[in-house]
Each structure stands twice: as structure tokens, then as C-alpha cells.
Image (cartoon, rainbow, N blue to C red):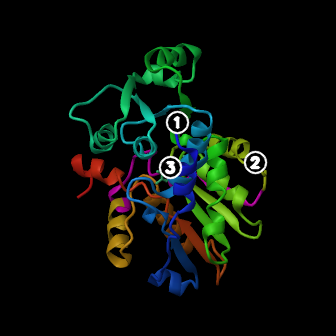
Amino acid sequence: MNVEAIKNYFSSYRQTPLQQVTDDIFLQKKINLFIKRDDLIDEHLSGNKFFKLKYNLIEAAENNYSTLLSFGGAYSNHIYSLAYAGKIFGFKAVGVIRGEEHLPLNPTLSFAKECGMEFYYLSRSEYRKKYSEEILSGLEKTFGDFYLIPEGGSNFLAVRGCSEIPKRIEANYDYIFCACGTGGTIAGIIDGSDEISKVIGVADLKNASFLKEDIYKLSQTKKSNWEILLDYHFGGYAKFSSELLSFIKSFEEKFNIPLEPIYTGKMLFAIYDLTKKNFFPENSTIVAYHSGGLQGLKGLRERKIWS
Ligand SMILES: *Cc1c(COP(=O)(O)O)cnc(C)c1O
């Protein structure tokens, strides 16, 4: 594996725009909102997954691993990105998928398969024990030695990658928002933040109070300029209401910024709602981190949840 090629790829990252959103509510409340468009980094390896994979891929290549293995649901943005990274950098990628195989493959997994990813399905109960000795040794028997990346890609190297996000934002701001699944991204943003600004995460899972501890553990700097909002999950992971869907549609129509309902849609909804409730002092500047994930819309379209 060519370590230099991987390093070059990640250092030739394209600077993405910071796009202002001038909706009436923000003018009225004197709030400046910008979206950091990291969804535009690349079509297939974009958003936070670009930063989460960066040091993991370098680490795997430096240690001469030829196989990458990770875990995720059948619509996972992480699995999708990992498959693509495997293809462009010449690793074999294995996706351990929660639940049974469904054929034909959904758009996420069929893209992953085209990239050469191999799948291994675990029942939901096995999946809960995915890091157990028993499951991992079974995976080793099947695939040989591999570089393991945890579910969602969240480990210390992912956090290190995400700590590079804030310094690529060319503006001063009071708040930076991001969507939270496992918390790796926000932990990195906290580590890379200056302590004048506040980092706010919007949790996509229901009952996600455990996230606070996970983020605290993942973060290397143990700063305290952050907060997690637990009440904008819309029923939980991959759950959404028609109100959320129509919000996302109208946002895209007005500003030409696509969102999806699992992560970035909930984050923007939270920012609008908090603005209405006067959460932000007048003249605050907010940056919302667009973490990508737009590939997921294809699966929603196929299931007629999205048009
Ligand atoms: C994976 C993902 C997240 C969640 O990131 P974590 O590091 O797991 O918190 C947020 N937004 C998008 C678009 C994602 O794909």
C-alpha cells in the first residue's frame, strides 16, 4: 500500500465553501448562519467521513495491512465511504453488516459492492456482540488479518482527523454545530476548536445521554466548550417526520443546499428552532458543519420515503 499516495490525496483536499443562509428568521433575529459545505469535498468520500478515515488509512498502510474491516447498518455512510477508500487506495475492504442480507442490494451496498467490498452479515443479536473474541476470531478465520475500524469509524485516529475541521473554516464564529451519531466527529471538532466558540452537537439517536461520556472519552483535550442537544432526534436514528422532510425540501429549494433527514436535516432544523426560541444572543455567528451523507438519499428514494 502506498502511504505517500494516501497522504497526498488527503493533503490535496479542496477548500470547500462557507455558504451564508439568509433566511427571514435569521435576519429578523440578527443571526448570521453559514454552512461549511464539506459535502462538496468529493462525491463518494466526503463530509466527516473524509476526516474520520484519513489517519486510519495512513495507519493501516504504514503497518502493511491489506484488508480494512468495519461495521455498519445497510445504509451506512461509513460503509459506503470505506468501500470507496478501499477501491481508490487498493485495500480489500470488508463490511460487516447488521441484519440479514437483502437482495437486490440497496443503493448503498450495491455501490460498496461495485467498489469491491466484501460483506459479512451478522444477525442483530450477534451484531450487538460484534467486538467479542468469538465474533472477531470468526472474522479473522474468514478474512485473515485485518485493520479494524469500529462502527461509524470512531476511534482516536478519526478524532484526530476531525480536529482538522475547525481550522479549515475561514471565519470567526460563536457557535459551530454538527450532527452526532457516535460522537467521533464532534470530539474532533472540540479538540480543534478555539475555546471562544461553542461546539454544539445534535444527537440523532433517542436516549443518547450516554453520548456525553463517549464524547468526553474520545476527545483528547477535555475542553468544556461544548454541549449535546438530545431532543432533536425525531423519534430516533433514521426516524423522521413529514415536518422534517418538508423542512429539508424547502431549505434545498431556497438555498440550493441538499440535506438528508438522518443527520444534517435534524441539525439545521435544530438551528432554526433554537433561533425562533431566542437561544442565540443577537449578532451571533453560527457555522453549521455539513457532514455529507447525501448518498443515503438514494436508499430513501428507493423506499419511497424521499422523492
Ligand atoms: C456518520 C455521520 C455523522 C455522525 O458522525 P459521528 O462521528 O458518528 O458522530 C454525521 N453526519 C453524517 C452525514 C454522517 O454520515
Q: Nearer the viewer, residue 2 or 181?
A: 2
**Residue that numbered label 2 is attached to:** 220
Pinpoint residue 105: horizontal percent, then vertical percent. Answer: 25, 36
Q: Amino acid at mark 3?
A: Asp
Count of labels in the image: 3
Is 63 on the left-hand or right-hand side of 100? right
Q: Secondary structure at mark 3?
A: loop
Report, in whole angstroms, how far the alpha carbon at label 2 lies from the one at label 1.
20 Å
Q: Residue at x 41, y 36 (%)?
A: 73
Q: Quadrant of residue 242?
A: bottom left
CB of mark 2 near ligand 1 (< 8 Å): no
**Residue that numbered label 1 is attached to:** 151
Report, in whole angstroms, how far the alpha carbon at label 3 lies from the one at label 2.
23 Å
Report, in whole angstroms, how far the alpha carbon at label 3 lies from the one at label 1.
15 Å
The image's mark for residue 204 is 3
CB of mark 3 near ligand 1 (< 8 Å): yes
Q: Which of the two labelled residues, at mark 3 and mark 2, occupies the earlier sequence position? A: 3
Q: Residue at x 29, y 47 (%)?
A: 299
Pinpoint residue 220: horizontal percent, then vertical percent. Answer: 75, 48
Q: Amino acid at mark 1?
A: Glu
Q: Residue at x 44, y 62 (%)?
A: 39
Q: Residue at x 40, y 21 (%)?
A: 123
Contact, mark 3 vs mark 1 (Cβ under 8 Å): no
- Look at the image and give the residue range highlighted in magenta: 224-244
What is the crowding at mark 1: few (fewer than 14 residues within 10 Å), some, or many (at least 20)?
A: many
Closer to us: mark 3 or mark 1?
1
Name the main secondary structure of what is drawn in magenta.
loop
Is 99 on the left-hand or right-hand side of 190? left
Q: Secondary structure at mark 2?
A: loop
Q: Nearer the viewer, residue 224 or 172?
A: 172
Q: Which of the two labelled residues, at mark 2 and mark 1, occupies the earlier sequence position? A: 1
